[in-house]
Image (spheres, rainbow, N blue to C red):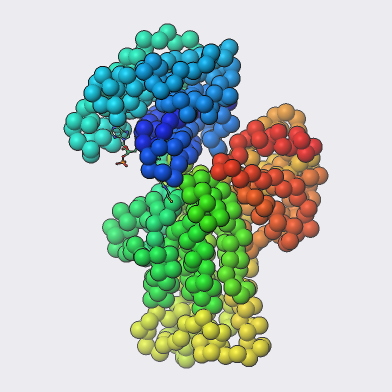
């Protein structure tokens, strides 16, 4: 459950019942009221049917994760009730489809407030069963102080596109739900905080934020093949990149899309693609080629449950091995990982810049939970972003594409540059690009290709340390797990436990000295991550002198703060 100034509402039902729309409306209404919003949704791989859940956490203060469990649970069907009834603890509120729904709950546990709302029945009486979710929305709005006018605005915006009749049914359903909610005597104290002065913020999902970062980052060419949970990035870019004069191609598969990205980049354009684990596997051969040919390219991997087709709509952080080392030969890459939606914007710009600066593949890791999580973030200002352009040949003297320079970065010549003709090749080559097998050359070129970005460990934003002094436990987290650990660390300290956090965003090259300096201040190190093998813990053991305790889960869901707090207590 949440803190006093928080409210966590969970809506659950069947895919196709409009759970996602309900959650989106609540989130948008609360964000428009100036509140902080962090959402989490999980849904099945089927387009219709299967358990679908949307959790909205709202607060007047900054929030970093979706919270432990709910304060308010709204069940659209019996399956949702069965899966969540064990979480109906004293102090929680239960809103459910009754009478007329497909289930009748067992005796309501003591201390739980129940508000039955005949959602299905009311919608049927209005002549549109589809609008059941808007009956629920009206009731939730009336019961928990969700601004009615704002909900109606977002509802109108969404359903107007589907036709006046559909909009009309839904507005009526909303009013009916409100009436049914108000018919209950409110006996609990749960409510969304009152509106605060609106700040200069936007509410946006992780995937859309990556698309926005790409456009802000000066992207010129994007090619991708659709794959859950990354597709929305391409949808965003498709809407906005052409307006800036850029080009988007939907390729026939992932191999083709990375091939097009390399071609466009060779031709001088800032280029990227976005995919998920299976797509990254397919692209790995050409990423080796990009490494060898020193071709700038940026790739977003929105991790999902794997391996293979795995759990396509579920959360996991299990592509770290693949992202860093997944290709033949020795071709480690720059790998960044985002914590939250704000990072999705800012670090997309960083990743595009790094690809240009270091002329190599850069992989940005997001994950299934962040992809669909909507969060309030400060409205980005284009003037705050620095855009890096690749080092280009000045046209003076004889051109050597792979010239050994002081910073190991060789100027590039765009095709068509007089005198700049060269071969960009996956074969080992000498400074002029022509194949060269000499042993000393291969060693020198490998050192060039891996050494040119090694200094990032000192120049990219320092890894954040959360806490000061000596600690009994240090928690190292990456990706969206960081937000959960931030809250866990704060709670542990409130309980008098000396805890610290360490949050790397540069996953490779690994800032080893920063890891070791942190570990030197902690008696024990815990590494929670959502994968089976403990992939970051593995890299920490391999690259540093730290011997961490690995804490892994891989059930398709993220950690919550209580899980981390409880694990720390167990470990200590
Ligand atoms: N009146 C009219 N239309 C309504 C409505 C209402 N009251 N409530 C919802 N809808 C519409 C929504 O607008 C949406 O239509 P759209 O697709 O044109 O936007 C549609 O019904 C689905 O509703 P929504 O609320 O968005 O989702 P849901 O809670 O019913 O859940 C999904 C369904 C979207 C989660 C699920 O069907 C899905 O897509 N699963 C993922 C499939 C996938 O990606 N598989 C991976 C394969 S690898």
Q: 225 or 518, which is in the foreground?
A: 225
Which x, y percent locates residue 348?
A: 47, 56
Residue at 28% across, 22% down: 124
* 408 is higher (above) or lower (below) than 93: below
- In the picture, residue 109 is in which quadrant? top right
Residue at 52% across, 64% down: 281
* 171 is higher (above) or lower (below) than 256: above
Residue at 55% across, 86% down: 429
Q: 295 or 216, which is in the foreground?
A: 295
Report the residue that reaches farthest toward the top. 185
The quadrant in which the C terminus is found is: top right
* 311 is higher (above) or lower (below) than 456: above
Say left or right for 383 vs 168: right
Query: Taking the image as four quarters, which one is ligand 1 found in?
Result: top left
Say left or right for 451 vs 425: right
The quadrant in which the N terminus is found is: top right
Q: Do we see residue 497 in this rendering?
A: yes
Which x, y percent locates residue 343?
A: 51, 49
- In the picture, residue 408 is in which quadrant? bottom right
Q: Do we see residue 453 in this rendering?
A: no
Which x, y percent locates residue 85?
A: 54, 23
Which x, y percent locates residue 19?
A: 40, 33
Residue at 29% across, 26% down: 129
Say left or right for 103 vs 319: left
Q: 356 or 320, which is in the foreground?
A: 320
């Amino acid at each position: 459950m949440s803190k006093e100034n928080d409210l966590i509402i969970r809506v659950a039902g069947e895919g196709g019942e409009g759970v996602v729309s309900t959650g989106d409306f609540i989130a948008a209404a609360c964000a428009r009221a100036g509140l902080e919003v962090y959402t989490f949704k999980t849904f099945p791989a089927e387009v219709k049917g299967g358990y679908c859940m949307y959790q909205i956490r709202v607060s007047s203060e900054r929030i970093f994760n979706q919270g432990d469990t709910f304060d308010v649970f709204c069940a659209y069907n019996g399956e949702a009730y069965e899966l969540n009834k064990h979480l109906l603890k004293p102090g929680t509120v239960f809103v459910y489809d009754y009478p007329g729904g497909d289930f009748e709950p067992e005796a309501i546990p003591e201390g739980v407030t129940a508000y039955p709302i005949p959602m299905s029945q009311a919608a049927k009486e209005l002549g549109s069963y589809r609008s059941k979710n808007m009956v629920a929305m009206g009731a939730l709005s009336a019961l928990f102080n969700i601004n009615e006018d704002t909900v109606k605005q977002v509802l109108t915006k969404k359903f107007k596109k589907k036709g006046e009749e559909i909009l009309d049914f839904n507005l009526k359903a909303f009013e009916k739900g409100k009436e049914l909610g108000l018919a209950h005597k409110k006996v609990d104290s749960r409510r969304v905080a009152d509106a605060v002065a609106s700040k200069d913020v936007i509410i946006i999902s992780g995937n859309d934020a990556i698309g926005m970062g790409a456009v802000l980052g000066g992207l010129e060419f994007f090619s991708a093949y659709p794959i859950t949970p990354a597709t929305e990035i391409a949808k965003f870019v498709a809407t906005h990149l052409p307006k800036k004069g850029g080009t988007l191609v939907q390729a026939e598969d992932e191999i083709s899309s990375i091939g097009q990205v390399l071609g466009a980049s060779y031709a001088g354009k800032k280029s990227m693609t976005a995919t998920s684990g299976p797509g990254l596997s397919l692209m790995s051969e050409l990423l080796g080629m990009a490494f060898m040919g020193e071709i700038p390219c940026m790739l977003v991997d929105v991790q999902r449950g794997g391996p293979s087709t795995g759990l396509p709509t579920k959360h996991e952080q299990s592509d770290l091995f693949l992202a860093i080392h997944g290709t033949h030969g020795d071709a480690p890459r720059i790998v960044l990982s985002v914590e939250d939606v704000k990072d999705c914007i800012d670090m997309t710009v960083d990743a595009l810049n790094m690809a240009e600066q270091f002329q190599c593949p850069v992989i940005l890791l997001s994950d299934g939970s962040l992809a669909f999580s909507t969060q309030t973030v400060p409205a980005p200002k284009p003037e705050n972003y620095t855009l890096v352009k690749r080092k280009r040949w000045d046209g003076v003297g004889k051109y050597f594409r792979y010239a050994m320079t002081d910073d190991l970065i060789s100027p590039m010549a765009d095709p068509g540059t007089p005198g700049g003709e060269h071969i960009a090749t996956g074969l080992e080559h000498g400074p002029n690009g022509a194949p060269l097998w000499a042993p000393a050359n291969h060693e020198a070129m490998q050192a060039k290709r891996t050494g040119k970005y090694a200094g990032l460990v000192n120049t990219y934003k320092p890894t954040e340390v959360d806490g000061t002094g000596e600690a009994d436990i240090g928690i190292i987290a990456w990706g969206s797990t960081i937000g959960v650990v931030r809250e866990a660390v704060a709670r542990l300290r409130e309980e008098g436990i000396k805890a610290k956090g360490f949050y790397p965003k540069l996953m490779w090259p690994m800032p080893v000295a920063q890891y070791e300096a942190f570990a030197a201040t902690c008696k024990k190190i815990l590494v929670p991550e959502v994968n089976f093998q403990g992939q970051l813990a593995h890299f920490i053991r391999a690259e540093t002198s730290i011997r961490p305790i690995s804490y892994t889960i891989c059930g398709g869901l993220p950690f919550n703060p209580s899980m981390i707090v409880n694990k720390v207590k167990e470990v200590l």
